[in-house]
Image: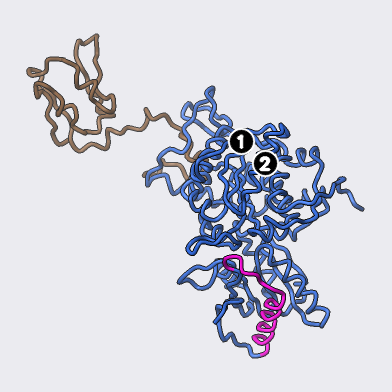
Amino acid sequence: MSRKDKSWKEVSPAGVCWKSSMTYLTGDWKTYAPVRDLEKCTKCLLCTLFCPDGAIHWKPEKGDIEFDMSFCKGCGICANECPTKAIVMKIA
Amino acid sequence: MKNNVEQKVLGLNGDEAVAYAVKQADVDVVAAYPITPQTIIVEKFSEYVANGEVNTEFVCTESEHSAMTACLAAAATGARTFTASASAGLALMHEMLFVTSGCRAPVVMALANRALSAPLNIHGDHSDAMAERDSGWIQIYAENAQEVYDSILQAFRVGEHLDVQLPVIVGLDGFTLSHTLERIQVLSDDDAKKFVGTRELPMVLTHEGKSVPYKLDPENPMTMGPIALPNYYFEFKRQQEDAMKNAVKVIQQVHDEYAVLSDRRYGDGLLEEYQLKDAEIAIVCVGSTAGTVKTVVDELRAKGVKAGLLRIRTFRPFPSAGIAEALEKVKAVAVMDRSMSFGGNGGAVFHETRHALYDADGHPFLVNYIYGLGGRDTSPSQIRKIYEDLQKIVQTKQVDELIKYVGLRG
């Protein structure tokens, strides 16, 4: 909550969303963040499929994956599912 | 000079009067589940649907919770929507009543007021509606079947008004009004349709940055009823309170406009005074009992007793200012409640009325009478006794018992 938040006279009625969810950075919620060991990672992309927030992207131009920390909530599912244990969770 | 329109007279009970008004109001969707004493409303309306007399999508649901959910969803598409319920049915809708008012969906509901179990009872009292006092619905209570018909037509205009956008309950006392045949004047279909008009939609800002009509529309997608966390939930609740405050004026305006059309007037639409101007003693009540009270007031006036009545037509929004103004010069007032608030200070109408008078200059003595629970009849002699009690309070300047029970054995 900040001074930038709208007053009750300014908000849309009935809670209709006036902003896209893309502007709501849920990455702020995390306590732990994934850290990847590049030597262990085989780029199998299982983490991109398991991430419930779609916060791990395959970047073909880089030939690598990328974590979008603006939307990673730090749930740790990627670390849990990684077959080579290349991802560990550390305090963000 | 009369400028009201031509009307015809029909013999209808309160439930049938509701169905007739809903038919005339050109409602898009009706979703309901039968429950006594409301059943006749949907029975009658389903006949209109079967006969092709209305262009309404009629949804038979498996429960009242689903009925209310279907109504909310229909209203969210911009449809004019109606449902009816009573007692346990309304209680089962409880969760969805809050969602509906929170989504600012102006659904209209006829509520054939009935007692709640246990013990099981199908007869009239106000326990069902009073239990939903804080659900964010406007509550209008009718005195007779004529007013039921008139109020349903008005309810669509009130709820759908751009300054209001709230759902509306029109209460009719179970059996006393729902099942009793009355001589009712009805508007022509054209006049009723013209009065009710079509549903207007407020404009809202969506996540795409567009200002569009508030309805579910694939061309203009929007998120309705999302999560609002501690940083925003409060603001939306405050908006609902503002809408209720706006409803005070809108109810009066719609009532006045309808009065010109029909030549029928119920006080200012919020409160109806009867012989109250110079009254020394007065009864405050809600619903059909006001008819009995008026009869007793006439008798007492003929004997020179300065007795009066203040009937509360809208319980939500509660017309506090009007009540204070109407009652501050009265010496003793009996507030009648047809429901109980166990462990509280009398019934809900008493709480509110007493509160409304707290800041008034020289407010009257106020006493509460709980009456008519589970459909128990309230007779003119019992009303007479209440006025006698009030006379005694005026003489002795003393209230011996704050909360009394009318017609209770023991």
Which residue type carries mark 1?
Answer: Phe
Give the residues drawn in magenta, as a range. Answer: B373-395
Which residue is rendered at x = 68% and y = 69% of the image? B325
Which residue is rendered at x = 26% and y = 25% of the image? A55
Q: In terms of depth relative to the viewer, which is nearer, B209 or B69?
A: B69
Q: Colour of chain A?
A: brown
Q: Colour of chain B?
A: blue
Residue position for label 1:
B58
Using the rendered image of the protein, determine whether residue B50 is visible from the camera's viewpoint.
yes
Using the rendered image of the protein, determine whether residue B246 is visible from the camera's viewpoint.
no
Measure how far apart labels 1 and 2 are at the Cα level. 9 Å
Which residue is rendered at x = 75% and y = 72% of the image? B276
Asked whether the residues under the numbered discs 1 and 2 touch, taking CB atoms below 8 Å apart as contact, a structural biologist would say yes
Residue position for label 2:
B45
Which residue is rendered at x = 69% and y = 63% of the image? B288
Instruction: Identify the mark nearer the N-term, 1 or 2.
Output: 2
